[in-house]
Amino acid sequence: MKREQHKKKKGWKKIVLIIFLLIIAAVGAYAFSVYQSLNKAVDTMHEPISREKSDKRTDEVTLDKKEPSLF
């Protein structure tokens, strides 16, 4: 009788472990799917533009560290 109870306890733990691992795998697959979807969306959103210097601007814009001016 004790042997049957011991087997039932082991079987129960194994089933719970398998269900837990399946849930973790499903959550991981869902997270990967969401990541891939977002990555694809960002790739389609960003389109670099190629534009030349404006005719109104005489000098090239430089972004060096300079003192800020009010006007």
Image: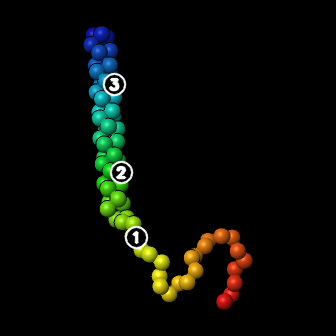
Please give the residue where the numbered disc 1 appears in the rendered image. 50
Residue under label 3: 13
The disc at residue 4 is: none
Element class at badge 3: helix
In this picture, is 1 found above or below 57? above
Q: Which image quadrant is residue 29 in? A: top left
Q: Quadrant of the N terminus?
A: top left
Disc with the residue nearer the chain's start (3 vs 1): 3
Tell me the element at label 2: helix
Q: Amino acid at mark 3?
A: Lys
Q: Read off the residue under disc 2.
A: 35
Q: Quadrant of residue 44?
A: bottom left
Q: Residues within 10 Å of mark 1 (few under 14, many from 20)?
A: few
Residue 7 seen by the camera: yes
What sort of colour scheme is used for the picture?
rainbow
Front one among 11 and 27: 27
User: Residue 21's x, y, as percent?
Assistant: 33, 33
Instruction: Indicate which label's residue lies in the foreground, 2 or 1.
Output: 1
In the rendered image, the quadrant that contains the C terminus is: bottom right
Query: Answer yes or no: do the residues labelled 2 and 1 have beta carbons within 8 Å?
Result: no
